[in-house]
Amino acid sequence: MSDSAPQSLLSFLDVPIVVGDPDGVVAFMNPTAAERFVGAGQSAVGWPLARLFDGGVREAVLQAVARACSRGSSVRFRVRHDGRGYQATASPITSSDTRVGVVILFQESISGDERFLTLFREMREPLEEAATALDQLLEQTGGRRARRFRALVEDAMRGLSRVQKWSDELSGLVSGDARPSERPRLDPARVIREAAAAVQEEYDDAQVALEILASGQLPEAKGDAELLGTLLVRLLRSRLASAPASAQITLSARSVGRDGKHAVVICVVDVPEGEIGSADESKAQDLRLVGNLLSELDAELRTIADPLVGRTTAIRLAAATPTR
Amino acid sequence: MSQQEARRLVREGLDAFGVGDQRRAVECWRRALELAPGDPEARDYLDAAATAGISEALEAGPGQGPALTAETLLREARGMLREEDPEAAFELLLLAGQLAPGELEVESYLDMVRCQLLKQYRDRVGDPRARIRVAAAPDKISRFQLAADAGFLLSQIDGTTNIGDLVSLAGMDAFQAYRIIDRLIKAQLVEVVA
């Protein structure tokens, strides 16, 4: 195949295409690209890529090219030029593992996507303002009398943090800049330590002991640390509410399973005051308590109550695949 | 060499048990105990199998006795708890956990029994500020064929570290550490210094 063959085919496309060489110099651009970015009948072949665009577009293009070359995989990004919005893709061109250039395809974007992105940008500021306000509110609720309010503020902060996280993820999906979805993973030992620390003062005030039983070598688990932390804090507070003075509540985490199928089981164990009740009753109570957190966490929860030994709420999380 | 083979047989027994082959599991543990007569794990699993009636059912021949599942083991474990024998209940629950890994009812009971046992171990071991020291000669210790975690914990006992620090530094959870210390004291391999 001659060198001109692919060029002549690309020339018929109604989508701007620019090819850069390893030195960042334009090696090829099809007529549509020339018309939109340089001027009809003109060519920018031989120009540095940095000269092709101005301002924010230049920065976005150069960043995407650098990322595509360093990653060795395509990078999607958005630019706006001469009143048109583009969903662009920069892909490295490799030959025998050597990078020989980059090809950038500028696909004109749908206006609805841009509206979404504008809305996400609009949302970011008030979310940050709300987070700052809650931070300040938390500082004002240091005293014992305000403990209840502080717990509510902490809940609100966790909720807000989740909204920010999912908003960023959604924005990444719409902009096309999201990397292949990586399932969040968490360090169970760390999450339970932090959850215990969050309620320790309340336990001290109520003279209820809180013990952690976890080895220092637990595998990572699939799931969101923030969500699991919220769930555990709620469970620990709920258990504290029904604990007699001088009681002990245990928060444990263990690795279970074999044959490559591993899970992490986290348990909150207590002996509540009065009748322990049936497992079904306590199960229903806990499920109401944790609301929709479980479905978001992709975990399984069960409460077992037995007058002989007490009550346990157990949460099973799938172990994450070990990272190399 | 025989100790390594015994370890391998204990694991093989657990694998067999996990896939419901109780006959092979019990055979493996028996062979492990023949090779390493003091092996605590093989002995524990055989004891638990005996408590659950597995050994008798196997002696009686195929098709005799109840089918052994995590549910039957859990039921047996509850029975042991009613008889105030949490140690036996714990062994049965460990086996149930092998049959149904991650089953939340079994795991919940395991944790409740762990909490109960931990309290007992703490009461027996005593003041965590007390020091602990090795009380047996190396040849006596080697006869016990200690499991790896017990051997590790024993190696950390230097006569100057107190029990609380030993448990904190063991790298295992408090239940495991206290369980091992309790067993070492019972076997008179270590002693608490007054």
Image (tube, coloured by chain):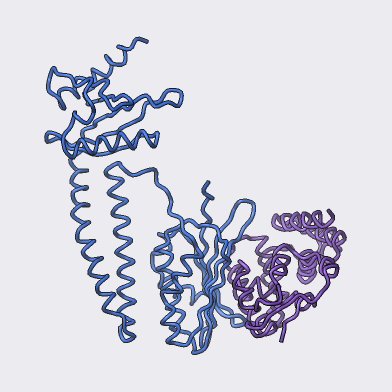
Chain colours: A blue, B purple
Q: Left or right of A134: which side holds A227?
A: right
Q: Residue at x 22, y 69 (%)?
A: A133
Residue at position x 14%, y 18% from top?
A42
User: Is A220 on the left or on the right of A157, as rendered?
Assistant: right
Report the side of A7 relative to A205 (left or right): left
How far across and down, in percent of the image, does residue A217 sit?
Answer: 57, 61
Look at the image and tell me in which quarter the N terminus of chain A lies.
top left
Residue A64: where, in percent of width, then height?
Answer: 29, 37
Residue B19 vs A292, above or below: the answer is: above
Residue B60 appearing in the image: no
Q: Nearer the viewer, residue B163 or B92?
A: B163
Q: In which quarter of the image is residue A130?
A: bottom left
Q: Can residue A178 be seen in this view?
A: yes
Residue A230 placement: quadrant: bottom left
Is residue A171 depicted above or below A16 in this figure? below
Of residues A6 and B13, the one nearer the viewer is A6
Q: Is residue A143 above or below residue A49?
A: below
Give residue B48's quadrant in the image.
Answer: bottom right
Which residue shows up at 61% across the image and 80% down it?
A309
- What count of labels does the image hold? 0
Residue found at the far front of this picture:
B160
Q: Where is residue A101 in the image (x, y as percent from the top left)?
A: 34, 25
Horizontal and vertical percent for residue A311? 55, 78
Note whether B87 is above or below A243 in the view shown: above
Of residues A276 and B161, which is closer to you in this image? B161
Question: Residue, x 19% and y 19% (percent of image)?
Answer: A31
